[in-house]
Image (spheres, helix red, strand yellow):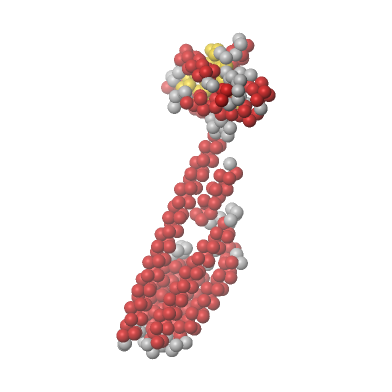
Amino acid sequence: MQGLVSSLNNAGDMGADSGSAPGVLPRRTSQRRRILVMMALSYVIDAILLLIFAYAGTIPVTTGPLYLLISLLTIGFFTTLSDASVTDRFTDNYLVTQQTVVSISIMLAFIYLAPEVGCVFLCSLFVVFAFGSLRSTPWQNAVSLAIVTIGLAILFLLTDKPIAMPLGSHTERFATMLTFVAAIGRCMFVGMFASALRESFYNQGVRLQEAYKRIEELAELDELTGSHNRRSIMKALDEEMERAARTRMSCSIALIDLDWFKKINDRFGHPTGDEVLRTFAITIFANIRSIDKFGRYGGEEFLLILPETSDIAAEQTLNRLRMIVADLDWSTISPGMAVTLSAGVVTMRQNETADSLLARADVALYQAKDCGRNRIERG
């Protein structure tokens, strides 16, 4: 059960972004680092393009290294914050708005400083927004869009910078082509990465649902026998009694007790006794209807609910189960072992409560024991 809860926490880490579960912070830090590394590689691609333009004589050779230095310093700054878990103190632990604003500022600044290759930085703005969309909210997107709109308006409308797309030489045309190809390729890569994240979240959601379902099952089942536990079987009894009263159908129950089970434990040991209980429960499950309910009432005592079953039919059913259990080859569990059952069978009366029904079944069960065991008594 503990392991299942741990799996449940792990499955919910990414979707819930909860820092309370063990291992969430390291995983979150690792994901932030991956995104930062991809951003750094994107800056490197831009720097390579700038070096090609420098080779063509379009811009000074220092532009590319200066751009890369400033970009990597900002990446290093945010990486340090992430690795030191400083960012985990914020609601937006990825600092999406801050990183997007810094990246936009770098692009706008270099458009102003190197307008001859403005197309490189304009294309990179699309890449910046692609990265930002991985974790941004609509409000964060709106803020980023407003900032880039204001910045571009200043550059295009309030300055006379000749923001260019270099096409003067073959090398410039080649570099410009690479600029667009690189921008499109990076946006596609970010899109594929986002798709992989969505698939990961979906798979985690599926595992989360499976874990919740398993926990619900464990909450209703007896750990040893796999049958309903006492709380679950009592709930089922209330439901079946209500249904029987509503539909005016018969409903019978049986309290079943394994004969001399304490002697089995004393003689063969408790592990063997546990195996007897498991085998008994499996045998009963294999020989009852799908609408019947079977659960562990306590110790070696079990409750069998038989909806839509009269008293005579219920007695016949229990006698059939009694003979099946007695005929099992229990010596496969331990040589010389024999196991039988006794049961008290009763049928619900009009306006009867669950306590009253169980009390009558208990009286019938003790009559079966008093009469020699390995028998069924109808109350």
Quarter of the image holding residue 190? bottom left
* Image quarter of the C terminus: top right
| Residue 68 against residue 82 in the figure, above or below | below
* Image quarter of the N terminus: top right
Question: Toward the viewer: 237 or 1?
Answer: 1
205 relative position to 77: left or right = left
| Residue 293 against residue 166 in the figure, above or below | above
For residue 375, say whether it is visible. yes
The residue sitting at the right extreme is 266
Q: Position of residue 234 (x, y in %)?
A: 55, 27
Question: Toward the viewer: 350 or 36?
Answer: 36
Residue at image position (52%, 23%) is 304
Quarter of the image holding residue 127? bottom left
| Residue 186 against residue 254 in the figure, above or below | below
Q: Position of residue 316 (x, y in %)?
A: 47, 14
Residue at image position (55%, 63%) is 29
